[in-house]
Amino acid sequence: MYRSKAIKKLIFLLKDSSFRILLEHLKKEDRPKINKNIDFIEWIHEDLVLAVKLFTEEQGLLKSRFVRCSNMIFRTEKFSILLQRWLVDYLGDLFNLIYDYEHSCLKGKYSLPLEDNPLNRFAIKRYESKFGVKIPVPWKPALGNIRKALSIFLQNLFIIYHSVKTGVVLFAKKETYKVMHESLWGLFSMHGYYFHDDFFVDGKVIMSDDLLLFSRAEIHHCSQSMKAMNQARGSSYASFYLPDLPISLIDLLLRVLPRYIFFESFVFISEIRSKNFSLFQSIFYYFSIYGLPYEKVFSNFNINAELGHGYFIAQHIPEAIVCNNRGAKYYLIHWSDNSVDLDKHILSFLGCDRFFLWGPSHVQGVEGNPEMLEFTGYFFKKFIKDIKINRKNVLKDMQISARGKVISFFDESFGANCIMTGMHYVNFWKLALESARLMSDHTIVIKPKGLYEYRNLPNNLIADFLEVKDELSRRDNVFFVDDERWSFVECIGISDLVITQGMTSSATIAIICGINGLYFAEAEVDHIFSRHFKDKLVFDSAVSILKMIRRIVDGDENPLHLITENIMRGLDAYKDDSGLDNLKRILSGVNS
């Protein structure tokens, strides 16, 4: 054990001095996070993909030896996608760090030391040009050729260590599963009736024996994921914990050593004089971090496909590359309303085989082959309709004594990198309180994003929020939903009207399922509803939205009738509730 710790410490000591992972040192430091203004947020969302395209073309990165040879080594075409998506995430992080530095009152007390390379020079120049400022960067010299050669050795040492640190098995009896899916929410009875990790298992198309559940290292930071992992372990489903898996000796000798070490070492030796050496090494480090655990998955199991959810991070691309190497499909599924214009860069450079979307309006900024897009329709529509039919029983289970109409409020996150502010958050809660006061003969249900979201408020707003929440808690027509027990599916299904903070998903889902939804959007965001239904579905005034709430619950207004069939099919491709059936057929291999 002591030897293992010593080796690990040696690797990281050497890596800190010679194995240059761009931006890692800055992201780990404790730096102030500043609330971003709307101009910056809109620029980030509009400019990132364009900036990546300009930089890759300027540097010829997609034709580099690193990309071409890595594609050949791993029998894929996705290293070009990985490189571009990694750059999107990198530039986003760097621009946010620069903004925090530029606007912090501690500006003179810390600096932004960056390696002097084309990427960082490009980023600083682009930021300075956009905002007309001068960023004083203490440029660190790039690694010399000798230290680059040492970093290749350290890279290989790192790969070997992370391959064998959880053990090597000579032979593993491997079971075969149709679908691998990450444990995130838990199983039946833990997190609502339907919103759980096995929602697509029906005993007809997808059997319980077809599903393999797994959990990642990040669960230690999330109580919900920890509960989900423990419930998966105690269930009849096959499951595993990704960081604990050993690697087979065959995969170590025939996959890791030749591909990750031997052939890639030659690639980096050929790029040793490149000004983009640190960039390439950072991307391959990233690939190894997320690719090696998946090599271990296939050392222990056979899977036909993974149904993933992490389309918003580059991590899914290394996972997809390894899955495809092993003959497995890698599918991604989107969970929220992506038709907001600000979401463009989130869907850029997808590395999956298919991306399941509710409808074409949710395609914002997708780069690459359009054939990967699969419009399934909204797959929880069937569940929400079931809740509507059994509403009395569900309300009883949720311990809600409903009277009149049920009006549900869904708040949303706010903060440093978000268009919504703490004031928007407090104003939304004030709207819920005013609704409870004015409509005491109706039921107010509040579905909070999290129990302690308010702790992120500025100090001058916390007292206001707690006063509002306290009065809501004392009213007999107000019910708070246990967020760890009941999901958005139940909360929407029991509702006559759903109101969201900003242009967020819950109101859109309600509308898709034939339930009225309204948006209290004080922060302006481009959405098909904000363009066509201002002051009908979307409001920036508490007075105006309260009038509409009253008219809807009194039966004098039904905004659903305003929405044309064309707009609705853009949000949800199918009029019926076949979305889940479409998904199950693909996962079972019928349409693959």
Image (cartoon, rainbow, N blue to C red):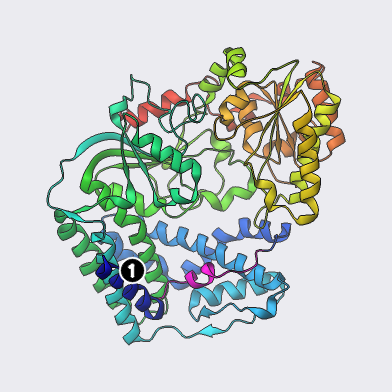
Above or below 393: residue 435: below
Which quadrant holds residue 144?
A: bottom left
User: Residue type at mark 1?
Assistant: Phe
Considering the image in quadrants, where does the C terminus appear? top left
Residue 30 lies in the magenta stretch:
yes
- Position of residue 193 measured from the top left corner of the image (x, y, whole percent): 50, 24
In this rendered view, identify the residue nearer to me: 195 or 516.
Answer: 195
Q: Give the range drawn in magenta.
A: 19-33
Residue that protrudes farthest toward the left in the picture: 170
Q: Can residue 331 be seen in this view?
A: yes
**In this rendering, does residue 134 appear at all?**
no
Q: Is residue 273 above or below residue 221?
A: below
- The percent position of residue 317, horizontal first and vertical second, equals 39, 53
Residue drawn where x is 62% and y is 59% of the image: 44
> Quick check: 476 left or right of 147?
right
Q: Quick one: label 1, few (<14), some, or many (20+) residues within 10 Å?
A: many
Q: Where is residue 208 in the image (x, y as percent from the top left)?
A: 32, 26
Q: Is residue 50 left or right of residue 477?
A: left
The residue at the point 61 percent across, 75 percent down is 125
Label 1 secondary element: helix
Q: Mark 1 points at which residue?
A: 66
* Extreme-front residue of the structure: 2
